[in-house]
Image: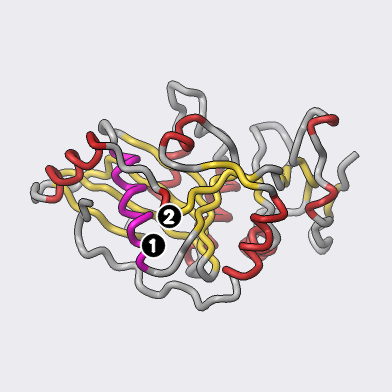
Amino acid sequence: MIPWLDPDDAFPDVSEALTELHGAPGLLAAGADLSPGRLLMAYREGIFPWFSEGQPILWWSTDPRMVLKTDAFRVSDSLKKTLRKIARDPAYTFRFDSAFEQVMRNCAAPRADGYGTWISPDIIRGYCGLHEAGYAHSAELWHHGELVGGAYGVCIGTMFYGESMFARERDASKIALSQLVFHLRRHGVAMIDCQQETGHLASLGAHPIPREQFIQHLKQAIQFPAIRDWTSTGIQAP
């Protein structure tokens, strides 16, 4: 049985999350709210919200935890070719944080794979609040002035928590992610939290690690000064 959180309640320790024996591995608590303060509290403790329409707010801390080490990001030969091509094409531009809510709404749109619709209006409001406070960031690929791909997440110190990405053109989400990874790597971010295990993330170099190891890294990384420079220097190609 998981606890129900009132607005002023602290989270239980992540070691109390349910396991596979309970049928919902990683589920830690329910309730509370999606205010920026609550979201920051969650991320600092290795916890994230994830729930479907009609469900209460559910809080998770999975074990193992899927992570992408920035120096292990896998750029395929085809993606390298694409990056080199669009880096020379003035019709494409890359930006950080110029259309955060628009990126979220694109990520929330229904997709053929079924993902995306868990990003509810309440989730959007909460993360837009984090963006306004300087903790949530978007990576955006633009083509002829239209947003065609992007990703967003939360950054505390040198810990980045990836949330979702979308594409309106082939490989656009991978391009946006690559630019985000290159930027984070330059600013001392060693690990991106991917939360859930998927084959797509694994193909990009992500892998699961024990939650205890993830929490140890997180506790150190969030102590570093925040990244202040979120300006783009153009599309980077390896």
Residue kind at label 1, given as amino acid type: Arg
The residue nearer to you, when weighing 131 against 162, is: 162
Residue 165 in the image, given as x and y percentages of width and height: 42, 42
Residue at position x 55%, y 53% from top? 125
Mark 2 crowd level (few <14, some 14–19, many ≥20, 10 Å Cα): many
Sequence-first disc among 1 and 2? 2
Overall secondary structure of the magenta section:
helix
Can you identify the residue that label 1 sits on?
185
Circle number at residue 227: none
Mark 1 crowd level (few <14, some 14–19, many ≥20, 10 Å Cα): some
Question: Whole-Å distance between the Cαs marked 1 and 2?
Answer: 6 Å
Residue at position x 49%, y 29% from top? 199
Give the secondary structure at mark 1. helix
* Model colouring: secondary structure
Can you identify the residue that label 2 sits on?
70
Residue 37 in the image, given as x and y percentages of width and height: 66, 65
Residue 131 in the image, given as x and y percentages of width and height: 48, 62
Magenta stretch: give its range.
172-186
Q: Is residue 78 magenta?
A: no
Residue at position x 65%, y 50% from top? 48
Write down the quadrant of residue 111 in the picture.
Answer: top left
Q: Are marks 1 and 2 in contact (CB under 8 Å)?
A: yes
Give the secondary structure at mark 2. helix
In the rendered view, does 77 fall on the left or right side of 6?
left
Residue at position x 67%, y 43% from top? 64
Q: Name above or below for residue 50 compared with residue 99.
A: above
Please identify the residue farthest to the bottom as the structure is shown.
225
Residue kind at label 2, given as amino acid type: Thr
In the rendered view, does 87 fall on the left or right side of 222?
left
Please identify the residue farthest to the right as the structure is shown.
1
Point out the image quarter for the N terminus: top right
